[in-house]
Image (tube, rainbow, N blue to C red):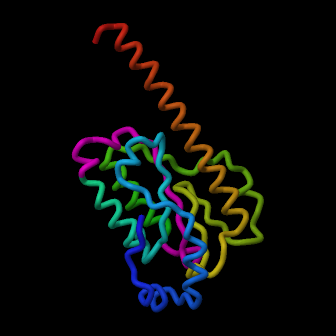
Amino acid sequence: MPETLTDKQMQDAWGIADLKAYKDRLKDIAVVKNEELVDADAIIFGTGVISSLIAPQMNEFINSLGDLWFENKLLGKPCTMFGSASNQHGGAEIMFLSFISTVLCHGMIYIGFPPSFKLQQTKYDEPQGVSNFGVVSATGYAERDPPLFDKEALKFHACYVAEKAAMLKAGAKVVAKKIEKAGV
């Protein structure tokens, strides 16, 4: 989604001294269009956590999906979410719960973080952003990269979501053939 803050707002609110370097890190990230969500097999949302809520930019994007909601275009679509917060206890669980209720209103299927990721139980030498809801990495105010652990957890979660999306899609094709064969 496009950035909605001015350069001055980003510097004042987030304390980003080198705005050019910050923007350079983001330059290759594509801005998604609403209609692209319809064709996706699954959607993985990413957002900052601000005061236990999704970032205003993400909120604006979600609010722009009204036409897709009205036409049930996201019904049955698997999705999940990841994020970044200024600290390890930045209100991620509350953010996840409020976001999950929003995607459920769209009829989407939220896929949480799988307990099969066993590494989370053995690595405690750095802050971890893994919960049953998803991954939220404590990155400060964009001043540091997520820890390797969180990156690995997010890759694992993304693969898990892709696997479940493929299963749903394959199952839908089987059901459609049975319905067609039955003449319903």
Residue 143 lies, with reference to residue 44, above or below; the image says below
Q: Which residues are magenta?
A: 67-91
Image quadrant holding the N terminus, namely bottom left
> What x and y, as percent, mark residue 79?
46, 48
Left or right: 149, with 35 as reference point: right
Question: Could you tell me which residue is drawn at 61 percent across and 60 percent down?
Answer: 130
Question: Could you tell me which residue is drawn at 43 percent across and 90 percent down?
Answer: 8
> What x and y, as percent, mark residue 167?
53, 31
Q: Nearer the viewer, residue 143 or 17?
A: 17
Name which quarter of the figure residue 65 lies in: bottom left
> What x and y, as percent, mark residue 70?
22, 46
Q: Is residue 72 magenta?
A: yes
Q: Nearer the viewer, residue 139 or 128?
A: 139
Question: Could you tell me which residue is drawn at 76 percent across and 62 percent down?
Answer: 123
Residue 72 lies, with reference to residue 184, above or below; the image says below
Image quadrant holding the C terminus, namely top left
Name which quarter of the figure residue 39 lies in: top left
Left or right: 100, with 139 as reference point: left
Q: Nearer the viewer, residue 26 or 132?
A: 26
Question: Could you tell me which residue is drawn at 25 percent across and 54 percent down?
Answer: 66
